Amino acid sequence: MRPASGRWLLRWRRGLLALLVGLAWLPVQAQSLGQAPLRGDMPDMPMGTLGTVGSDTLAGLMLRWGEQLTHHYPGVRLQLQVSGSASAPPALTAGTTRLGPMSRPMTDEEREAFMARHGYPPLEVEVARDALAVVVHRHHPLDVLPLEALDAIFSRTRRCGAEHAVDRWEQLGLDFPTRRIELHGRNLASGSYGLFRQRALCDGQYRRRLNEHPGSAAVVAAVTESLDAIGYAGLNHLTPGVKALGLVDAEGALHTPDTESVQRGDYPLGRSLYLYLNLPPGDVLPAPERAFLDLVLSPQGQETVASLGFVALPEETLSRQRHDLGLTP
């Protein structure tokens, strides 16, 4: 018969073993309860720092996605450098960044420079949709504007067909004090600057008196402070201090910058937002990039798009890109 002291020692050891097993299980349980896995979770936890150089428009989205990525994969960090869409292609070409967020497509010249260095094109991934809204002060009497008038207001070349420049609000038939229109827009490094120039100015030249700002928020702030002002800014930067104008095309159709028209592609100043990567054809995505794109193209990632005032991608676009990138359905 085992001595009482021996039986006590055996029970103590069994209790200690059960306690250790329970403690070892608790972090796994806590992780599974507090951290929903992404659809493309990988067996090996990705590690590393993802450097990004590019768009100001995408900065808030990239920051939020970076926080969500680190929540799912603590070993991955996102480093942001916000210097405008034009800064992304040279950084990718030089190899000084891993991700290039852009609020416009790469130009032919930017692609050719990348291909001359690497021998293959950059990988382009559409991550969200957006639009430029033309904005005036919230108390301004104007509600709609012909696209042709935008060119007459903002451009010195008037390539869209306007016969005369529009310098003052009364030239548009408004009962408005005789004052000069203030022009506000983005600076040359911005994708918004190029998109507005292409779509609203028919690739013409801006007026020299355009007040150029480094971000859409600064444009909106300037228009909020002046009843004489007009500008353009991304949808996610609009505030109650400004009014977004409807735009009338050459056929007389009115277009408003709402989610449905942007997702359909009907709005004249709608655009796609992109991430560019350096990935040789046939290679698989490195683990950190794979984890990041899996998040961005997931329901959670696209919910973040909508929550920040952008327009989520259509489901067919998400499915096609996930398939092309080798991500799980």
Image: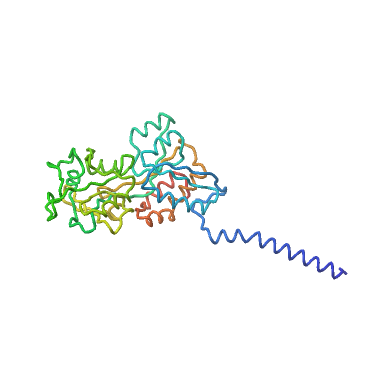
Left or right for 48, reference 234: right
Percent x, y of residue 288: 51, 45
Give the image quarter of residue 112: top left
Which residue is pictured at 34% across the width and 50% down the height? 129
Location of residue 2 in the rendering, given as x and y in whole percent from the top left corner: 86, 68
| Residue in the foreground of this view, choosing between 318 and 252 | 252
Q: Is residue 308 left or right of residue 270?
A: right
Which residue is found at the position 36% from the left and 41% from the top? 85
Q: Give the mark count.
A: 0
The spot of residue 256 in percent (x, y) is 24, 54
Residue at 11% in and 52% down: 173
Q: Is residue 60 left or right of residue 269?
A: right
Q: Nearer the viewer, residue 111 or 317?
A: 111
Q: Position of residue 10 (x, y in %)?
A: 80, 65
In the displayed orientation, state which residue is furthest to the top: 116
Q: Quadrant of the N terminus?
A: bottom right
- Where 122 falls versus 47 (above or below)? above
| Residue 329 visible to an observer of this rendering | no
